[in-house]
Image (tube, rainbow, N blue to C red):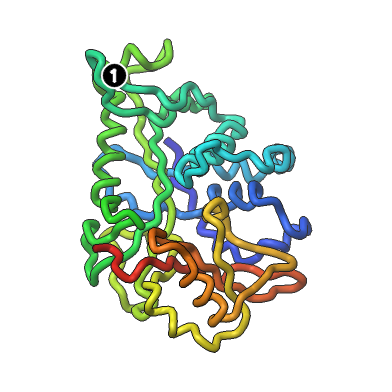
Amino acid sequence: MKGVSNKTAIFTHMNETGMGERSLFLREVEWVLHAPPLLMHEAWSPGIALWPDSWLDEYDASAALHEAMKAGAGWRHPSGMLGKQFETVASFCLKQIPSLEVMAEGVRAEERGRTLGELDMLIRDTSSGEWIHLEMACKYYLGSRTSRSWQRWVGLNPADRLDIKVARLEMQLALSDLEAVRHQLPQGTPKKLHRAVWLTGFFFVPFDRIGHHPLPEYAHPQHCGGWWARVGQLSALSGREAQWIVLPRKEWLARWESASPALMTGDELIREIRRMPASFRGCMVVQAIQKGSSWIEVSRGMVVPDKWPG
């Protein structure tokens, strides 16, 4: 496989392309292409490569593909789920790369009528003839304790943990080696498949421990990061100027930007979140600054119920 790309864009100059305010889909494509992995190579079993790979350089280099992105604007996965939308955008990007051929997606792995899992994608590198089994996921994990242990990094649903997700991805990658599964793969699939994982997203640390909270073991040094707070802790934002947005869930995947946003003060943000139903699991908050004629995201946080994660 090709070497892993060194791209680590910080995404703070979104309007310098001359496009003005871009569509949500364009911003999703940009984030998916450039977001670093959550974990480094050492986090994975031997033989598992990291994605994104240097193939993405080909994508960025082609002006024609920029037009393809614009043509896809507004394309949403019908489920509305963040993970599925990530897979939709990632699939779109991979299918535009000239040297890659997507051979299969969402292959259900079964043995004697029992579903073992699903293979996200099989890809062929047309220049080398190599086949890659790729598993992908976009996850948001909050540091629930002062610990580097993956068990202490959990999602809005506390049952969603980093250690469980890593184990699940490795299990999915192993499925393509099973003899019972191989006959379900496309005709011509070679016995030797390269394995790669594309795990991206955000790590959120407690807002009162920014810069001091330990990151997960093997956290990628350029991972996307943010802060989290319980509703009862938001009083720290009281009196802050108007620079806050509650981000709709359908926009969580992209870096936020707007030419004319309806910004809230810290007190307005507190009131907005306190009006949410008691059943809410969490919401995403963006802090914005003005840059030129637009406002851009400078930080994002996750606000969770006071009893989270218990």
The residue located at (43%, 79%) in the rendering is 234
Q: Position of residue 102 (x, y in %)?
A: 51, 26
Give neighbour class at mark 1: few <14, some 14-19, many 20+ (Cα, 10 Å): some
The residue located at (24%, 65%) in the rendering is 148
SS at circle 1: strand
- Image quarter hosting the C terminus: bottom left
Q: Nearer the viewer, residue 279 or 48?
A: 279
The residue located at (38%, 16%) in the rendering is 185
* Residue 222 visible to the viewer: no
Q: Nearer the viewer, residue 282 or 190?
A: 282
Q: Position of residue 41 (x, y in %)?
A: 32, 50
Q: Position of residue 163 (x, y in %)?
A: 24, 51
User: Circle 1 sits on which residue?
Assistant: 110
The residue located at (46%, 27%) in the rendering is 123
* Residue 118 visible to the viewer: yes
**Quick check: 32 above or below 267?**
above
- Image quarter hosting the N terminus: top left
